[in-house]
Image (cartoon, rainbow, N blue to C red):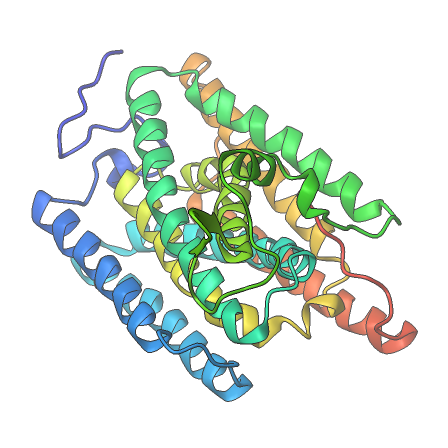
Amino acid sequence: MSPSLPLTLALPFESDAPAGLHSIATPGLWAVTIIGVAALILLDFLLTRRPHEVSFREALGWSAFYIALPLLFGLWVWAEHGGETATRYYTGYVVEKSLSIDNLFVFILILSAFAVPRALQQRVLLVGVAGAIVLRGAFIAVGAGLIATFDWTFLLFGAILLVTAVKVYRDARSEDDETIEPGDLGIVRVMRRLMPVTDGYHGTRVTVKEGARRALTPLALVMAAIIVTDVIFAVDSVPAVFGITADPYLVFATNAFALLGLRALYFVLENALSKLVFLGYGLSVILGFIGVKLVLHWAHGVWPATPTVPTDVSLIVIVVVLAVTTVASLRHVKRHGSDEPARVSQ
């Protein structure tokens, strides 16, 4: 099998869904999407150019906007490309959104470890989101190229997700409190070797002049830490969405929409995240399920009698797992109180 990789991508994926064999994207659609994502990031930068503490009402409004946007986009996909493709898109978005909530646990630890002033937190998250979208775009391009070239890519992605699922489960069971020491982060050590770092923050500036030399501010370190952290998350989140659809455009769209809403979602959920005490268990089940789905798809290509998992079944399983996880967490907190620390699964 040696499919080519032109702009309209031939994709060997999911025999149960013929509509997913080709990317829905045209060069024009890619251009509009990239320009649209860049415009939204620029808008966020303009609106946050003056540092301020984000109120719950402001965060809720932006979070609602960034949830409505991908939902409306899904309706367009449905109208233009049919229910099967739209179901894949929505399933991928739900997976990516649930994994992005797990990102927030780590972001809270990083912002706390670097003692980032509340007025600067949204700028840190926004830079992290912008960098993450670019890096995930690169991950997706590599993943799409592998899928179009090697049949065993699905087996590789499945194995990555199964290993990650086990790690997430073990972390969820761990009773040790998760902490982050800035000096232990590799990116921080590298940056400190390259340039001196000031003791305090200087507004939104990432460098300042100290004497004859230019120095980094802690803001530069924490932004780099956020971006590197998201690269680590991308190792499992990108294969997870490829487990739903092999269309790189839809994979990029789900990742971009989930990341764009991450800044606002952080300020909406920062006080509620500790209540999702069983989130790690739910995510481990979802990652394991998608990992098995990918392995079955690879096996189906080798042994056609091997069953595959339809997209609508995937959506039902993922939604049910998230619902059970959320309800169980809230009932546990109501019964035992909310002093139990949130579990970090990365």
Please give the name of the residue rendered at 22% of the width and 64% of the height, measured from the top-left corner: 39
Residue 111, quarter of the rendered image: bottom right
Q: Quadrant of the C terminus?
A: top right
Which residue in the rendered view is the most extreme toward the bottom? 57
* Residue 254 percent coordinates (x, y): 37, 52
* Residue 2 percent coordinates (x, y): 23, 12
Which residue in the rendered view is the most extreme toward the front? 211
Q: Nearer the viewer, residue 331 or 227?
A: 227
In the image, residue 157 above or below residue 149: below
In the image, residue 185 above or below residue 315: above
* Residue 131 percent coordinates (x, y): 38, 48
Residue 174, can we see it?
Answer: yes
In the image, residue 338 above or below residue 170: below
* Residue 264 percent coordinates (x, y): 47, 72
Q: Nearer the viewer, residue 195 or 24?
A: 195
The number of callouts visible is 0
Please give the name of the residue rendered at 31% of the width and 55% of the height, measured from the top-left corner: 86
Which residue in the rendered view is the most extreme toward the left? 28
**Is residue 171 toward the left or the right of residue 293 in the image?**
right
Residue 313, can we see it?
Answer: no
**Is residue 81 toward the left or the right of residue 218 in the image?**
left
Q: Quadrant of the N terminus?
A: top left
Please give the name of the residue rendered at 23% of the width and 54% of the height, measured from the top-left corner: 82
**Is residue 76 toward the left or the right of residue 143 in the image?**
left
**Is residue 314 toward the left or the right of residue 28 in the image?**
right
Which residue in the rendered view is the most extreme toward the right? 336
Please give the name of the residue rendered at 43% of the width and 57% of the height, measured from the top-left corner: 208
